[in-house]
Image: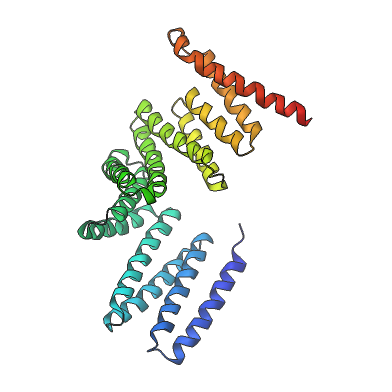
Amino acid sequence: MHHGPALRLAKRVLEARQFLHERDPTDFGASMALSGAQMTVAYVAAWAEKDSLFDRAIADSRAILKRLLAEGKNKDMVTSELGQLDRRYAHLLKFRGRLTDAITIYERLYAEARQRDDRWLRAEYAKGIGYCLAQLKRGDAALEPLDEAARLYEELRKQDPQRAREAEVGLQSVWMSLGDAHRLAKRREIALGFYERSAVSKAQHVLRGATDEATLTSLSTALTDARTVGGPTPATLEITARALQACGRRVAAVQAIEMALRKLDSADEGKAAENRDLRKKLETRLELLRGFRKQRM
């Protein structure tokens, strides 16, 4: 993807903010606006894979905030902005694949969140640490932070109903990383269980109306990862087919059902009875979908 126009626009905005700041370096608002413009440049530079510009913009933004903090101006606001800057920096480092650098920042932010007893941020930063460790193929080291993140998100989902969806999305991501960590350790059945929990949760979100491209792509990723360890199971494919049908992706829904039926055909004979109802559901839905396609032709 070409990011040149976005980067040029971000730089022009930065130049305008610098001009206003130079007119009155003591103006708090102008300083904050300049720091924000540096952060915008950092975002675009990260997407454009320009690491030196990205690091410089982050450093310049932090330097402005540190100066304001030293001057004692709106300490609470500036402290909050510094925290947000480091949070964004860690996420962008993770996005850029600079995982060791990201872990260093995540660990510091986690310690600060733990000291403040902020469980939402503790969960987020533990999730970030675990993800990075799993991507570095340090699966066993990833388990502790990921287990903690999962526990915190489970607690928060129950205790804060208004943010239950946010906690569920956090869990989906944690389950994917736990699947990666256990797959690295050759624990295929455990890995499959986590991939499938994530896939089923995402499919349920689609059925509840979350038909955005990001959710559907995330569901596809979970299913793809499940295939690396022998999945997905027919039951997971059945709810996936329902989700795909609900958002108009009927061809993909048919493919999911056909895969599920093939898996049922190759299942142990001893499981034939328990799979009977599932097979009936799948065949009924497949017949309906194929009937719809014939009507459209």
Note whether 41 is above or below 152 in the view shown: below
- Residue drawn at x 65%, y 33% is 250
Q: Is residue 210 left or right of residue 252?
A: left
Q: Is residue 232 visible?
A: no
Query: How far across and how far down the image is residue 207, in percent?
Result: 53, 38
Q: Is residue 272 visible?
A: yes
| Foreground of the two, 277 or 148 | 277
Q: Quadrant of the N terminus?
A: bottom right
- Residue drawn at x 38%, y 33% is 194
Query: How far across and how far down the image is residue 145, in percent?
Result: 28, 45
Task: Tell me the quarter of the picture where residue 138 sits.
Answer: top left
Q: Is residue 230 left or right of residue 283?
A: left
Note whether 270 is above or below 56 in the view shown: above
Q: Residue furthest front?
A: 161
Q: Is residue 175 left or right of residue 238?
A: left
Q: Residue furthest left?
A: 115
Q: Residue furthest top?
A: 269
| Foreground of the two, 203 or 181 | 203
Q: How is the image coloured?
A: rainbow
Q: Quadrant of the C terminus?
A: top right
| Foreground of the two, 41 or 223 | 223
- Residue drawn at x 43%, y 37% is 198
